[in-house]
Amino acid sequence: MIASCSISYDILKIHQDTSDPEQHQFQDSSHLFGTNKSLARKKYMLVLVDEFSRFTWLEFLRAKSDAADRIIASIKRIQVSLNLKVKKLRSDNETEFRNTKLHSFLEDVGISHNFSAVRTPQQNGVVERKNRTLVEATRSMMAHSGVPKSFWAEAVATACYTQNRTLIVKRTGKTAYEMIEKRKPDIKHLRLQ
């Protein structure tokens, strides 16, 4: 499962982010987490991160070809439920992000789509770091709990849920949840150790 993860992180140099941190802008990335399927028979995970708040949404996919539909649905849901205007989508240069359907949707709603250069993960650094923290938290939770590998999607979702509500964004002193929802999260139900 995640132990055989095909993600690699090359740390080449510090890359300065030139985006405006006061605007909600979303990044996305999808990666294969080994060959094991989740309980719902999903093999891929799409990670969407708001650059401003660092709030993270997850989508689990059966095939990489599902990415465009899930990105479109996620953007629509985010814009309606949070009343936010997504202005930019940043993704890596993989084929699932370079397709006519996604391009047409983004063009129709006025969202610019920026691609990172090949083999330069630092250009999509926010989501690459989020992938890494999610994978590390998931590995730790699964090793500690002893659950079967088929529970990887549930473990990643739990890690994401917890991180959105407990990790403090340094520049604001608030959690990602608090910045998105405009209220403190209720975490009484979480068993944090």
Image: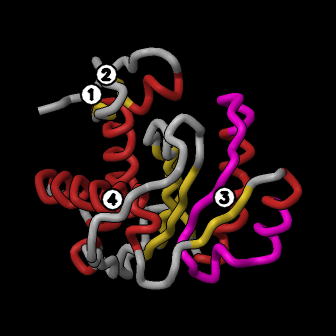
Quarter occupied by the N terminus: bottom left
Task: Identify the residue position indicated by label 1 in the image.
Answer: 190
Question: At 31% across and 21% down in the image, what residue appears?
Answer: 187
Instruction: State which mark lies toward you, 4 or 2.
Output: 4
Task: Identify the residue position indicated by label 2 in the image.
Answer: 187
Local crowd size for mark 3, using a 10 Å CA cut-off: few (<14), some (14–19), many (≥20)? many
Q: Horizontally, is 170 left or right of 85 in the view?
A: left
Amino acid type, mark 2? Ile
For marks 4 and 1, the one nearer the N-term is 4
Q: Position of residue 76 (x, y in %)?
A: 74, 45
For marks 3 and 4, the one nearer the N-term is 3
The span shown in magenta is 79-105
Point out which mark residue 71 bears.
3
Q: Quadrant of residue 97?
A: bottom right
- Where 95 falls versus 142 (above or below)? below
The foreground one among 166 and 11 is 11
Question: At 79% across and 69% down in the image, what residue appears?
Answer: 103
Amino acid type, mark 1? Leu
